Image (tube, helix red, strand yellow):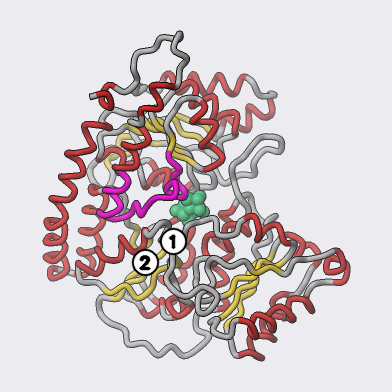
Amino acid sequence: QYDNDGALHAKLIEDVLERYPDKTAKRRKKHLGVARSGEAPGEDGAVVSECEVKSNIKSIPGVMTIRGCAYAGSKGVVWGPVKDMVHISHGPVGCGHYSWSQRRNYYVGTTGIDTFGTMQFTSDFQEKDIVFGGDKKLERIIDEIEGLFPLNNGMTVQSECPIGLIGDDTEAVSRKKAKEHDKTIVPVRCEGFRGVSQSLGHHIANDAIRDWVFDKKEIAFEAGAYDVNVIGDYNIGGDAWASRILLEEIGLRVVGNWSGDATLAEIERAPKARLNLIHCYRSMNYICRHMEEKYGIAWMEYNFFGPSQIEASLRKIARHFGPEIEARTEAVIARYRPLVDAVIAKYRPRLEGNTVMLYVGGLRPRHVVTAYEDLGMVIVGTGYEFAHNDDYQRTGHYVRNGTLIYDDVTGYELEKFIEGVRPNLVGSGIKEKYPVQKMGIPFRQMHSWDYSGPYHGYDGFAIFARDLDLAINNPVWDLFDAPWRERPRRRAIAAE
Ligand code: ICE
């Protein structure tokens, strides 16, 4: 059960470090820790924990890291969901092929006509392209795409590792072809070797928006007083749709959603909005800071996971717009209260007291914590693949004393931590799912929502609660042990 003072967790850290060679142990030690309650209360009055571990540092060769690369951060995360553009995976075929349609970022449109989200475009580099350069090929591909898909609203060139290594000038090609076809063409220098994880790919993709999209053409758009951009909601399983209705119900106009279900036009007109609402801080804080500096647009972080955070976020957003929006917000919160109460009445008794360990990318390891707590569950450990220092600072607002914290956890460490803690649920990714289930522990994928969703907003909370119940109270977990190995039934609640 819950390790209140973190003594067990501290011991677990010691145990895993003991197995490493000295040098590795010394390096990994800095990334592992136990959250400690600090003195100062946070924004909402709750005590903030300190969970400062080292982060955003190169993984150690030889360990199993779960991180991705810069190309993943740009093509897979930030640019890929922009639906009316063609995103060319520029380089050898594998990067595009093996990441093809992996992120469940939903969109509406007619694929292959005016939207291209689930298609794969690659320049399929061969040896001769590496030797003689691929710029000519890229030109040809851009022309070909124009011919085959004339309704595309632009293209991006997502560079894979070899492009940077051989020194191709994708910028020159993009400039030339953009002029010829009178289209936006954005070269993105997201070669996989850049940086230590996908995180730098986010940053590079943000910079490409700044340098290749903003202020490039006249935007005919009538701005309103309640215009907001939603930044960093990628519409995984429909998340952005479940969020947008709430913002509209309180009286705001969402003029851009970055980048789930987004069009290029939504990116171009973003600097005309009144406020940037940022959900995924990690992947898009850069462009929000830029819009603040250059266009004077304020930005605000919010969290639409679970009713506690939704209510707090809606109120915070409303305060920015004044009494009229605030009154509407209270009415919206009141209107959804019966739904929230019904979900909690049904699922909380079935989930109460269950412990959870999380391991996800750069935002969710903190953002989802309260949603579990709204259902009576307890987060006993959490960690990020590629968070930075500012993410761990923000994590302090969410976690309690004694929580096990692990940064860029290795496959070995994660397995040992799960074995030692034996939580009732692990929330992480596809690579973690089956080993954890084989340990007899229920699991939910927290990247893809395990092919479910949405999980954002009130509608999402109802689905989240149901999914956790299905995972944890599935009778299969009582059949896990061999009959001659006696163990008390794990799930008294399910039996009832
Ligand atoms: Fe942001 Mo998987 Fe999204 Fe976050 Fe980011 Fe990634 Fe998605 Fe995960 C993402 S943008 S793809 S909320 S890169 S689930 S940081 S790792 S926690």
Residue 324 image offset from top left, x and y in percent: 13, 71
Q: Which residue is mark 2?
A: 230
Residue 172 image offset from top left, x and y in percent: 72, 80
Going 44% across and 12% down the picture, which residue do you hit? Answer: 483
Give the tally of numbered discs: 2
Residue 234 image label:
1
Residue 36 image label:
none
Residue 450 image offset from top left, x and y in percent: 44, 46
Q: Amino acid at mark 2?
A: Val
Q: Amino acid at mark 1?
A: Tyr
**Residue 453 falls within the magenta-colored stretch:** yes
Q: Is residue 218 left or right of residue 190?
A: left
Q: Nearer the viewer, residue 153 or 255?
A: 153
Quadrant of residue 145 within the rendered picture: bottom right
What span is colored magenta in the figure? Answer: 444-465
Task: Determine whether the beta carbon of the residue marked 1 sits less than 8 angstroms from the nearest atom of ligand 1.
Answer: yes
Quadrant of residue 322 within the rendered picture: bottom left
Residue 16 image offset from top left, x and y in percent: 58, 23
Going 41% across and 44% down the picture, which residue do you hit? Answer: 393
